[in-house]
Amino acid sequence: MNTISAAPASTAPFTAAHQRTVVDALRAVLPEQCVLFNEEDTRPYECDGLAAYAQLPMVVVLPLNEAHVIAVLKVCRDLSVRVVPRGAGTGLSGGALPIADGIVLSTARLNKIVKVDAYARTAVVQPGVRNLAISEAVASLGLYYAPDPSSQIACTIGGNVAENSGGVHCLKYGLTVHNVMRVRVVTIEGDVIELGNAALDAPGLDLLSVFVGSEGMLGIVTEVTVKLIPKPKLARVILASFDDVVKGGNAVASVIAAGIIPAGLEMMDKTSTRMVEPFVKAGYDIDAEAILLCESDGIPEEVEEEIARMTEVLKHSGATAIAVSQDEAERLKFWSGRKNAFPAAGRISPDYYCIDGTIPRRRLAEVLQGIAQMEVKYGLRCANVFHAGDGNLHPLILFDANQEGEFHRAELFGAEILEMCVAFGGTITGEHGVGLEKINQMCVQFSRAEMDAFLSVKRAFDPLSLLNPDKAIPTLQRCAEYGKMHVKRGMLKFPDLPRF
């Protein structure tokens, strides 16, 4: 299998005169310190969490308020300058990768919690507020914000909205889209619109659900109203070991089939537990082929009943050992290994490539077996950590970028995992977004008619295609080129387009 690189579409150098024109126009509407253009100042913005791809932007702007955002977008519209929105830069799909002749618009300084309503259980926040900071701010009220991506200590709510982020507790409490009630957005025309409502429903088309997960291609978020929920009285987690990954995968499906919706249901394979355990000492069984973390939360009586039911299901599914957290400290210790899986990869490999795909839960065991076969095919190790309850996979492909060809093999490995997800009835992303990383796989998953519909939505919001262009939705030419390598049932995708 071959691949087309997902490198940035625009790496054309800009002229000094053009840069000066843009900088002067931006400094006319922003304080001088909010406009960065020297290389040493723009270098920190050259990539997001997908650090394999990097590109210096022409200019970086850091607006301090909504009025600044409006002014910046009007300048960019008037000068036809392309804009890449950026939050904390923790994204893993290249969604915040700059464009050589464009600007990066960072919302990091829009970081105020505007209002908390304890009675309505809502918080109004700016996009630069960290995910965890919301829960910290309302902890004294007995409330918290449920979506908890592993990067929650650093990632911002604006980025969470852009990627529709989830986390280990999304099985029970939902993704960002299920926990956001309203967003305030600035369009490329400089107009301010509000999508959603503080009420349970809003008039007109449900554009809020269209906007959440749109990866900065439709507008710039300046304010978000999020739901807050009461902190559970009690939470306990089961740590279950399995001597076979297939048994572990089947156990996930069995828990859900039993009518149980845990607060969290995560799976890690032996490679993952062995890289994590020395790092955080979470108490994992490093001889197990797979472990499951199954959490229950609620009132004490509810938790005890659910823990007992899950324990019974796990025993019948072949668990070789089961431990239940006895207090909050032990619960957090059990979770610490899963939360630190990505940084722990650095202990055993110079580099890793994190994949994000989703499959039906019942196919989990088959996917694990398929990934094991790919490890042999590509000569690379893969550590598997999953939001198993909702079928969201996060394989970590381990490689050494200093070894010639290894990163390319890692890319091919990742592409094949994603296309296996599609073949098994899943999708190419669960919460990391498409960005540039998965743009080829969009050609595999979606038809021409579907992508035409996506592009129509994009054009309705951004007719000049200035907002995060060349991301998430592939051009038909790219799909034609990639389609040459994907013949299905004797038919090429987009047969009417010329091959290059």
Image: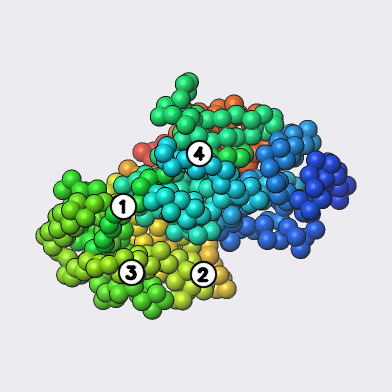
Identify residue for label 2. Answer: 351
Does 30 appear above or below 189? below
Mark 2 residue crowding within 10 angstroms, few (<14) / some (14–19) / many (20+): some
Does 281 appear above or below 290? below
Image quarter where the C terminus lies is top right
The mark closer to the camera, 4 or 2, is 4
Mark 3 residue crowding within 10 angstroms, few (<14) / some (14–19) / many (20+): few
Marks 1 and 3 sit apart, C-alpha to C-alpha, by 16 Å
Secondary-structure class at tag 3: helix
Identify residue for label 3. Answer: 329
Residue at point 44% right, 71% down? 344
Q: As rendered, which of 235 and 45 lies closer to the eye?
A: 235
Residue at point 28% right, 58% down? 235
Asked if the residue at tag 2 contacts the one at tag 3, i.e. Cβ–Cβ closer than 8 Å, the answer is no
Identify residue for label 4. Answer: 225
Identify residue for label 1. Answer: 232
* Kind of residue sitting beneath label 2: Asp
Residue at point 69% right, 30% down? 189
Marks 4 and 2 sit apart, C-alpha to C-alpha, by 37 Å
Marks 1 and 2 sit apart, C-alpha to C-alpha, by 38 Å
The mark closer to the camera, 1 or 4, is 1
Of labels 4 and 2, earlier in sequence is 4
* Kind of residue sitting beneath label 3: Ala
Marks 1 and 4 sit apart, C-alpha to C-alpha, by 22 Å
> Which disc is residue 400 wearing?
none
Of labels 3 and 4, earlier in sequence is 4
Marks 3 and 4 sit apart, C-alpha to C-alpha, by 32 Å
Secondary-structure class at tag 1: loop
User: Residue 177 is drawn in which quadrant?
Assistant: top left
Q: Is residue 266 left or right of residue 394?
A: left
